[in-house]
Image (spheres, rainbow, N blue to C red):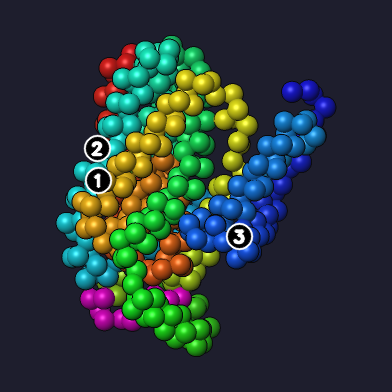
């Protein structure tokens, strides 16, 4: 690439502005392009991916490249997860306990197999096992966070290029998880008739009732305050855990969710009404903005430099994820509507990141109906417990590959 290419920088506010515009654009496209709506591709993904592709073309043509200040991306993600925590009522916690354990084993088994495949086929495609491992659960279940952590570690061991492969593979997974989750779950729901005419009638009645709800300024204000307090509590818990367990990495957004769960439980005990509709609405707005920002700022050109052997391994990861999601996750989590939504969530974080899971599930919820169970189980496992199991599994394979 020549040195004459112009770089346009966007500050924090401008980056947010573009994210919202692309979110609205994506939703408008979904209304007009039936295939996107039919297969529940999130509007934030449609708009964000469109911009990312245009940015890729402009960069490769050496016309212009963009730099964004994504400071607010983490903030909106934290707000969304905190809002999600308020959905964990006492009844839901009791109902979801067994399912959390089952899904934990499924997620851990998925991460293990995601590493078995590339390591076993490394010799076949002509790669060193450690480089092949950079297409496994490090970028898939782990996402960009794990890629940025374990990639440099592999390079320190003497495996040049490992970090670039891991980061590019994480980008590949993020795109794939965003596109694959909705269609797979939607097909399951339609094929298994998990959303009946009676469900549709009930959903339409609920939508009609929701349309008549007049939001109270006082309740909306209370909802924002509750979310901010929950996030603050989560931040304090995050700092406490860092002091008590300095060698253990806990995602701040999951701690925010825990803060929301704690406040919700206390409100249930005291029988204080929880403004769920308002909190969910705020959470959904934050989710849309976050996902749009995460997708449209992707560096798609990192995928161009991937060698054919790496692409082969990544395509095999997609096949593996589909098989596990369709024939393991769905049946073992109940083979019902909640299980179908959980399946979409598993594809989201099994290939990319938990926010992708939430976007997939939210898109399905907009078409069909909301699943409180799925929105509780998936982020608990994908955002928290799978970080521990995946780290242990990655360490095992890295020690073997070196």
When asked about the image quadrant of residue 83, the answer is bottom left
Q: Name the quadrant of the N terminus.
A: top right
| Residue labelled with disc 2 | 109
**Viewer-nearest of labels 1 and 2?**
1
Q: Residue at x 48, y 42 (%)?
A: 176
Q: Which mark is residue 33?
A: 3
Callout 3 secondary element: loop
Q: Name the quadrant of the C terminus.
A: top left
When asked about the image quadrant of residue 30, the answer is bottom right
Q: Is residue 118 left or right of residue 362?
A: left
Q: Residue at x 44, y 32 (%)?
A: 315
Please tell me whether residue 249 belongs to the stretch shown in magenta.
no
- Tell whether label 1 touches label 3 (CB within 8 Å): no
- Tell whether label 2 touches label 1 (CB within 8 Å): yes
Q: Residue at x 22, y 61 (%)?
A: 96
**Viewer-nearest of labels 2 and 3?**
3
| Residue labelled with disc 1 | 328
Q: Residues within 10 Å of mark 3 (few under 14, many from 20)?
A: few
Please tell me whether residue 270 belongs to the stretch shown in magenta.
yes
Callout 2 secondary element: helix
Label whose residue precedes the other's in the sequence (1 or 2): 2
């Amino acid at each position: 690439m020549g040195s004459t290419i112009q770089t346009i920088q966007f500050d924090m506010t401008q980056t947010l502005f573009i994210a919202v515009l692309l979110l609205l654009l994506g939703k408008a496209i979904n209304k007009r392009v039936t295939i996107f709506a039919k297969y529940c591709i999130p509007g934030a993904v449609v708009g964000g991916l469109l911009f990312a592709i245009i940015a890729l073309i402009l960069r490769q043509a050496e016309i212009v490249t963009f730099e964004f200040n994504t400071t607010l991306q983490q903030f909106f993600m934290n707000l969304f997860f905190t809002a999600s925590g308020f959905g964990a009522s006492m009844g839901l916690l009791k109902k979801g306990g067994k399912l959390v354990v089952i899904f934990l084993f499924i997620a851990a088994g998925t991460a293990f197999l995601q590493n078995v495949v590339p390591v076993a086929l490394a010799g076949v495609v002509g790669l060193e096992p450690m480089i092949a491992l950079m297409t496994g659960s490090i970028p898939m279940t782990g996402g960009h966070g794990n890629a940025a952590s374990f990639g440099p570690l592999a390079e320190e061991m003497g495996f040049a290029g490992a970090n670039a492969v891991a980061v590019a593979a994480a980008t590949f997974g993020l795109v794939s998880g965003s596109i694959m989750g909705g269609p797979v779950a939607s097909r399951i729901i339609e094929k298994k008739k998990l959303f009946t005419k009676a469900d549709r009638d009930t959903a339409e009645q609920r939508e009609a009732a929701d349309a008549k709800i007049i939001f109270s300024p006082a309740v909306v204000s209370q909802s924002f305050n509750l979310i901010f307090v929950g996030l603050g509590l989560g931040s304090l818990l995050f700092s406490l855990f860092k002091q008590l367990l300095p060698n253990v990495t806990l995602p701040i957004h999951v701690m925010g969710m825990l803060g929301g769960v704690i406040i919700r439980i206390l409100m249930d005990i005291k029988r204080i009404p929880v403004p769920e509709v308002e909190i969910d609405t705020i959470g959904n707005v934050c989710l849309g903005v976050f996902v749009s920002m995460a997708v449209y700022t992707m560096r798609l050109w990192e995928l161009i430099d991937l060698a054919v052997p790496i692409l082969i391994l990544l395509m095999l990861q997609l096949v593996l994820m589909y098989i596990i999601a369709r024939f393991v996750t769905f049946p073992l989590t109940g083979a019902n509507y909640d299980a179908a939504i959980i399946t979409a969530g598993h594809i989201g974080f099994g290939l990319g990141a938990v926010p992708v899971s939430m976007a997939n599930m939210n898109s399905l919820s907009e078409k069909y109906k909301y699943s409180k169970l799925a929105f509780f189980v998936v982020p608990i496992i994908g955002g928290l417990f799978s970080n521990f199991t995946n780290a242990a599994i990655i360490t095992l394979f890295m020690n073997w590959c070196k």
